[in-house]
Image (spheres, grey):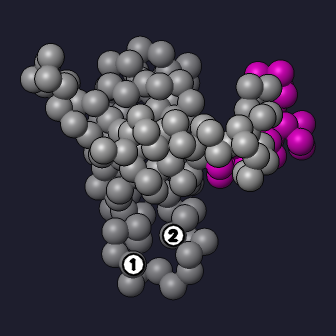
Amino acid sequence: MDDFNNNIILNHSDTKCPIAAASAVLADQWSVIVLRDIAFFGKRTFRDIISTNHENIQSSTLAKRLKRMVDIGLLSFESDASHAQRKIYCLTQAGIDLVPIMVAMAAWTSEHDMFNSDIIQFLEPLQNKNSLAMEAFLEKLSQDHLR
């Protein structure tokens, strides 16, 4: 992700449009995929994310995206007490607030036959933003990630 897009996100005066600012966050394929792995699959460490990522993200790319998402406030991290060099990544409230958007993106691809809908079946209960399932899922994420 280039410095221009990071500056749009970090310096609110660089853009006059909230959609442009959101697209700077969501237009980066790897950031959304990493957020998916953390939110939906419980991957919280660098090793967990890279070893199970089906899109084959490179380690240097993952390191850059994790740093960027911490810098822009989508993730935070804490040190792992059992391993001095290991970081445990947590969604921030801003990261949790992106979850319904990611569910809507998945539903949109299924609705428009852009993807095999069988693979995203587990998201169906979450597709209504105001559903009890979505509410419970977001509450669980808040309990697991916000400290």
* Vertical side of 22 occupied by 127: above or below: above
> What's the distance in space between the residues labelled 1 and 2, CA to CA?
8 Å
Report whether residue 31 is seen. no
Residue type, mark 1 in image: His
**Range of magenta residues:** 100-119
Asked if the residue under mark 2 is in contact with the one under mark 1, i.e. CB atoms within 8 Å, the reply is yes
In percent of the image, x 53 and y 24: which residue is there?
Answer: 41
Report whether residue 52 is seen. yes
Residue 21's tag is 2
Find residue 94 and report its horizontal and vertical position in percent: 46, 56
Instruction: Name the residue carrying label 1.
Output: 12
Name the residue at the left extreme: 84
Find residue 115 and report its horizontal and vertical position in percent: 81, 31
Q: Is residue 34 magenta?
A: no
Find residue 143 and report its horizontal and vertical position in percent: 43, 39
In percent of the image, x 41 and y 43: which residue is there?
Answer: 91
